[in-house]
Image (cartoon, rainbow, N blue to C red):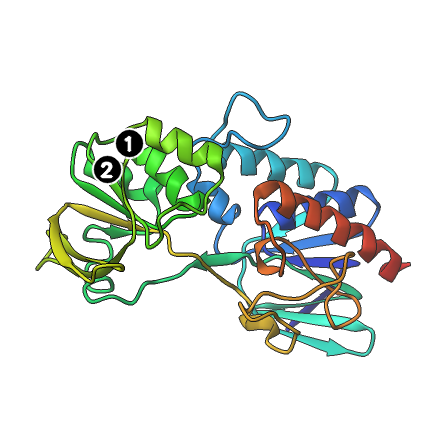
C-alpha cells in the first residue's frame, strides 16, 4: 500500500474541516483533507445561508462551501474524496488508512460532523424516499403545493419549514413542547410565513402503502391521538455525531467528542472540530472557529 506523509490531516470537508485546512495550509503546514461523502456536509442542505457574519445577501450552501474549498486549495491544502477505513497511532504519528493509500501525520483533526437522527416510528424506514425525508432542499421541490408535515423544534426544523413554505402553502410543524427550541428570529420568520405549529404533540406513526398518505399523532398532555392526511414528512429530530473512527476518545452523554479550548481531545495531537465536538452551540460560524483553532494548535505539535 502506498504511503504519504503530511504535517496535518483533517477528516471531513465541511465548514470545520475546510476552515482548518485553510488556516493550516496558509500557516505553512502540508495539509490533507479526506472526505468520503463529498464536501459540505449539512451545509449543502441550506437554501439560504443568512446568518453567517459578512456574507450578505444570503447565499446557498453549495456556493458557500465551494468558495471555502477553493480558498483552502489556493493556500495549498490537498483535498481528496476517499473514505477512511481506520485510524491508528504509531509512535508520534497518526496513521490514516483508506482503500488504496496509507497517510500519516503528527497532527490529526476529526471534523466528521453529525447526521440526522431517525425517530424510529412505524412507517419511517419503509417510506423513506417515498414521502419521508431528512432534507427539505433535496426533496422539497417534489411536493410543490402538497400537504407537508415538519417534525422538530430546533433551528434546523424551523429553518427548513421556512424553505418548505415557499413550495407549499400547507406546511405544519409538529413539536413535542409548547415552545420551540429554535432561535426567536428563526421562529418568528417561520410563523410569519404561515407555517402552522402543532404544539405538545409527538409523531406516533407514518402511514401509507407505497407513499406517505397520513400520519398518526398524539397530544402529550391529553393522550389523544388523531390522523392527519399529508403527502410528505420532513424529520429534524436532532443529530448523531459521526465518531465511529475514534470510539476510544472521551465523549459526553450525547456521544460528542470532548476537547479542551484548543480543540485537542484526550489523545495529544488529535483534535476535533465542528458538530462532532461537545459544545453548547452548533452553527457554521462556530464550526469554522473550531477548525481555525485546531489548525493553530496543530502548528505547535508539528514544530
Q: Determine which quarter of the picture holds residue 168.
A: top left
Across and down, in percent, residue 100 comes to 57, 68
Q: Residue at x 63, y 30 (%)?
A: 53
Q: Residue at x 43, y 57 (%)?
A: 238
Q: Residue furthest top?
A: 57
Crowdedness of circle 1 by 10 Å Cα count: few (<14), some, many (20+)?
many
Q: Is residue 190 above or below residue 177?
A: above
Residue of label 1: 165
Q: Is residue 15 above or below residue 35?
A: above
Q: Is residue 217 left or right of residue 179?
A: left
Q: Are marks 2 and 1 in contact (CB under 8 Å)?
A: yes
Across and down, in percent, residue 146 comes to 16, 37
Q: Which mark is residue 70?
A: none
Secondary element type, mark 1: helix
Q: Earlier in the sequence, mark 2 or mark 1?
A: 1
Residue of label 2: 171
Q: Residue at x 63, y 49 (%)?
A: 16
Across and down, in percent, residue 155 comes to 45, 43
Amino acid at each position: 500500500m502506498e504511503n504519504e506523509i503530511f504535517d496535518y490531516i483533517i477528516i471531513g470537508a465541511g465548514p470545520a474541516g475546510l476552515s482548518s485546512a485553510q488556516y493550516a495550509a496558509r500557516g505553512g503546514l502540508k495539509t490533507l483533507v479526506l472526505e468520503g461523502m463529498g464536501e459540505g456536509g449539512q451545509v449543502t442542505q441550506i437554501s439560504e445561508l443568512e446568518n453567517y457574519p459578512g456574507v450578505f445577501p444570503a447565499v446557498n450552501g453549495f456556493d458557500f462551501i465551494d468558495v471555502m474549498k477553493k480558498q483552502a486549495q489556493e493556500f495549498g491544502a490537498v483535498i481528496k474524496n476517499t473514505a477512511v477505513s481506520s485510524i491508528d497511532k504509531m509512535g508520534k504519528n497518526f496513521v490514516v488508512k483508506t482503500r488504496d493509500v496509507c497517510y500519516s501525520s503528527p497532527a490529526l483533526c476529526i471534523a466528521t460532523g453529525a447526521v440526522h437522527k431517525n425517530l424510529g416510528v412505524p412507517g419511517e424506514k419503509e417510506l423513506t424516499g417515498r414521502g419521508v425525508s431528512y432534507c427539505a432542499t433535496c426533496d422539497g421541490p417534489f411536493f410543490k403545493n402538497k400537504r407537508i408535515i415538519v417534525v422538530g423544534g430546533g433551528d434546523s426544523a424551523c429553518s427548513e419549514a421556512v424553505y418548505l413554505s415557499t413550495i407549499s402553502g400547507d406546511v405544519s410543524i409538529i413539536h413535542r413542547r409548547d415552545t420551540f427550541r429554535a432561535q426567536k428570529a428563526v421562529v418568528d420568520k417561520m410563523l410569519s410565513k404561515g407555517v402552522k405549529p402543532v404544539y405538545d404533540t409527538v409523531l406516533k406513526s407514518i402511514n401509507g402503502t407505497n407513499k406517505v398518505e397520513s400520519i398518526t399523532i398524539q397530544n402529550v398532555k391529553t393522550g389523544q391521538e388523531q390522523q392527519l392526511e399529508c403527502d410528505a414528512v420532513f424529520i429534524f429530530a436532532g443529530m448523531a455525531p459521526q465518531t465511529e473512527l475514534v470510539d476510544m476518545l472521551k465523549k459526553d452523554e450525547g456521544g460528542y467528542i470532548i476537547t479542551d479550548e484548543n480543540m485537542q481531545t484526550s489523545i495529544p495531537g488529535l483534535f476535533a472540530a465542528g458538530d462532532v465536538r461537545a459544545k453548547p452551540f452548533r452553527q457554521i460560524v462556530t464550526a469554522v472557529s473550531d477548525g481555525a483553532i485546531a489548525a493553530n494548535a496543530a502548528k505547535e505539535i508539528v514544530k
